[in-house]
Amino acid sequence: MKTFNAKVNVTLKKSVLDPQGQTVLEALHSLGYKGTENLRVGKYFEVTLNAQDENSAKTQLKEMCEKLLVNTVIEQYEVHLS
């Protein structure tokens, strides 16, 4: 077994409105950061797991994301494995 470290970035799909991101953007504008044009809020996970090989780790991470970590109807995700 090998130990793998993964970083998972989750964001709303481009077609989904991001009210939290809009609120943060408006707050930045009120603080004087007028040049900020767009902002989207997401989630970030760090996962350490043991697996036979990289393919097995990727398979496990995909299952984790699609079963629990990500709402695939409205969110998309990227996994970075090391």
Image (cartoon, rainbow, N blue to C red):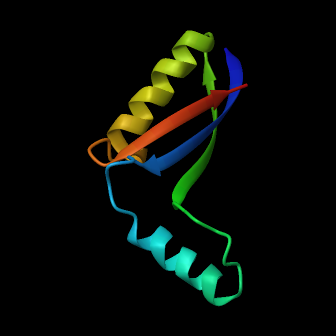
The correct choice, above or below, for 37 with respect to 27 in the image is above
Quadrant location of the C terminus in the rendered image: top right
- Residue 50 % position (x, y): 63, 24
> Residue at 56% of width from left, 20% of height from top?
57
Quadrant location of the N terminus in the rendered image: top right
> Residue at 53% of width from left, 20% of height from top?
58
The correct choice, above or below, for 8 with respect to 55 in the image is below
> Residue at 39% of width from left, 48% of height from top?
14
**In this orientation, which residue lies closer to the viewer: 60 or 21?**
21
**In this orientation, which residue lies closer to the viewer: 69 or 50?**
69
Residue extending furthest front? 35
The image quadrant that residue 7 belongs to is top right
- Residue 80 % position (x, y): 64, 30
Apparent side of residue 69 relative to residue 50 in the rendered image (left or right): left
Apparent side of residue 38 relative to residue 70 in the rendered image (left or right): right
- Residue 53 % position (x, y): 62, 10
Residue extending furthest left? 73
Apparent side of residue 33 relative to residue 25 in the rendered image (left or right): right
> Residue at 59% of width from left, 48% of height from top?
45
